[in-house]
Amino acid sequence: MGINTENKIIRIALAFIFLISFTSIANAGKETMIVESRLTFSPSIYSDIVTWVETATSSAGMYNLTTGNITGLGHAVINSPSIHGDKVTWWDEENVVVRNISTDKEVKIINASTPAIYGDNLVYVRSKSVDGQPTSDQNAEYNSLYLYNFSTHKETQLTLYEHATYSASIYGNKILWSRSNQAKNPSGWSTNISVYDIPTKRVSDISRTGRAGDGKIYGNIVVWVEHKNGLMNIKDVYMRDIAKHETRQITFDGNSTCPNVYDDRIVLEKTYREGEKWSSDVYMYNISTNETIRITNSTYASEPAIYDDKIVYMDSRNTPEYPEEGDIYLYNLSA
């Protein structure tokens, strides 16, 4: 059997050029470790504020990029705090807490969870008790999406309790959320992404595959993850421009998750196998140019979030034997 040496050389050359371009782009910015050696996950960023949740203390933290000060926010679980303007909000396991960063004044929304905030609009989930069980033990089918406006001090129920709702994201007058319903599939549940328009009260379905989740919204751009099989272990990232009614698949590797969007950029996490070890790194997709670049090469980076030219993410490169003890890094694209 003959070997086409010329084609082989061309393939090697192309692979080398591809590697060099990735390396040069990834190293164009500046990476800085901002929070060290904490049991952290789910970082988020708005302006010069970075937030996260610590599993060791079940608390939320806040880091000011300008002053370098770390502030403890209080008891928190699961989701990272959501920030917009001068307000930060998080779930303390029983209630939603909203703090004014300048005044330190707090407001609590009782019996609510998983909040997101934009301007004066706070969106969250309420659960109702069934058969005498506490709301914390209820299945998702007993959840309902609510909206509270700080200007009018009015709370509005947006969805019925028959529709399971969680993981909301809000931008302007549009609320993005996942809702699960019982369905005829191997897992018994169907999960889709929908958008609620506050002024018109109109609900639009973004994904109807029954295997969508982890959605985020910025402007008219929605990003989310589609699970491609019954085991839910083949995952790719999609986006939809709701103004243009255009949907686009962003990744094709089957191992992409944790998308986050800001302006023309989508950041995401890709996992891949290196020998016996599973690795992960952060990538960025440019919507206008349809170009994907690699941001990290530590093989331990995960859970990215983006604001303007700043990307924050978890990274356990310094404690690979204890990956849960991650550091938070900042990658500045314009530095």
Image: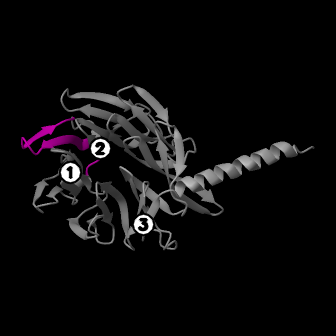
Give residue 138's position: percent from left, percent from top. 25, 49
Residue 177, how many percent across, how many down?
31, 40
Residue 248 is covered by the magenta coloring:
no
- Can you give x and y, in whole percent of width and height, for residue 311 in the image? 40, 55
Q: Residues within 10 Å of mark 1 (few under 14, many from 20)?
A: few
Kind of residue sitting beneath label 3: Thr
Visible residue check, residue 243: yes
Q: SS at mark 3?
A: strand
* Residue assigned mark 2: 169
Q: Residues within 10 Å of mark 3 (few under 14, many from 20)?
A: few
* Mark 3 → mark 2, Cα distance in angstroms: 27 Å
At 43% across and 68% down in the image, what residue appears?
324
Q: Nearer the viewer, mark 3 or mark 2?
A: 3
Residue 150 highlighted magenta (yes or no): yes
**Measuring 16% from the left and 37% from the top, which residue is drawn there?**
157
CA gap between label 1 and label 3 equals 24 Å
Magenta-colored span:
138-159
Give the residue pinned by disc 1.
85
The residue under the point 19% across, 46% down is: 126
Residue in the foreground of this view, choosing between 81 and 102: 102
Reading the image, the residue beneath label 3 is 32
